[in-house]
Image: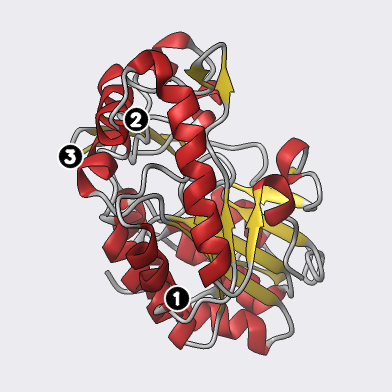
Amino acid sequence: MENTPLQPGLFGDDMWITSKPRMQPGKIGETVISFSLAGEILTRATGFMGEYDFTLNPYSGCSYGCTYCYAAFFSRDIERRNSWGYWVDVKENAVELMAKRRPSSLNGKLIYMSSVTDPYQPVERELELTRRILEIMAERHKPKLVIQTRSPTVVRDCDLFNRIEDNGGRVQVNMTVTTDDEDIRRTFEPFCPSNMARIRAIGEVQAEGIETCITMTPLLVVMSPYAFADSLVETGVQKFIAQPFHFRRGKFLAGTRDKAIDLMSEKLGCNRQSFQKEYLEHYDMVFDVLQDTLPELGEGKDGFAPPF
């Protein structure tokens, strides 16, 4: 799909908009795609992301359907919460909302994209909504932008990340990598790219001279900790973050499917009753290996503090 250049004048002499292709509501794979109008594209950051100025979510919902994802709990109704991973709402006026912002109004603003969706999930390859938002940022603003994804599609936009940097902004790309075991990945992250594909992709972003970080959040069971750590080092990435699952009354905070817990228990050689204890001991062991091997390793909320 060709990118349509920014067109001046549609909101007045100092405003911009991109004309964009229009997907029809339908399905990509098993995911139902719908369209809606958003009141705003930038949301004041709170809670875990409270040190940022804004969060930016081009989509609602996420077709990656990770079983541990806390974002499912932001769904407005139980049906959507229970069908997390099988629906995505496209904020079809996101580009217009960004284009209407006063030029330079985001200069120096810390923006986290995205907090409750993945800006590079499969629908982005068709719609290029995230890319068109980035085009406006590169043309009109100098933000301090952190991109969070688990998709190799992010490599596509390295040209725009460099443009933002060249124009006086800052960009860091965070790639989520969770395990070295594909059985575990397929169970917890059923529709995601493999972790090795993500590792290769973030290495490509790093090679383009863009700041990068690998986020092991949450860190699942790792079968070969030292080899896993070496594969992370080989990317050239200098920053890393890890955190464990959060448990509540012996269960994951998010609605993890039973077979995912059973598989992790099997890999750890324990039963479900002792899983929490065995998992946390395993996490501590792997964290120690990573800490000894990686250049810089943060943990939890402190690790996600703004990088610039």
Residue 215 vs 161, above or below: the answer is above
Q: Residue 236: horizontal and vertical position, in percent?
A: 47, 82
| Residue nearest the observer in this picture, 151 or 176 | 176
Q: Residue 83: horizontal and vertical position, in percent?
A: 34, 20
Mark 2 Cα shell of 10 Å, populated few (<14), some (14-19), many (≥20): many
Query: On the rendered structure, is 216 left or right of 140?
Result: left
Kind of residue at disc 1: Val
Mark 2 lies on a secondary structure that is: strand
Instruction: Of the two numbered discs 2 and 1 on the same chain, state the one appearing first in sequence.
Output: 2
Q: Quadrant of residue 202?
A: bottom left
Colour approach in the figure: secondary structure
Residue 303 vs 211, above or below: the answer is above
What is the tally of numbered marks visible in this picture? Answer: 3
Front label number (3 vs 1): 1
Residue, disc 2: 87
Front label number (2 vs 1): 1
Q: Which mark is residue 11?
A: none
| Residue nearest the observer in this picture, 163 or 299 | 299
Mark 3 lies on a secondary structure that is: loop
Q: Residue 46: horizontal and vertical position, in percent?
A: 78, 38
Residue 218 seen by the camera: no
Q: Quadrant of residue 126?
A: bottom left
Residue, disc 3: 29
Residue 23 seen by the camera: yes
Instruction: Of the two numbered discs 3 and 2 on the same chain, state the one appearing first in sequence.
Output: 3
Quadrant showing the N terminus = bottom left
Residue plotted at (59% across, 37% down): 38
Kind of residue at disc 2: Trp
Q: Which mark is residue 233?
A: 1
| Residue nearest the observer in this picture, 251 or 6 | 251
Q: Residue 219: horizontal and vertical position, in percent?
A: 46, 46
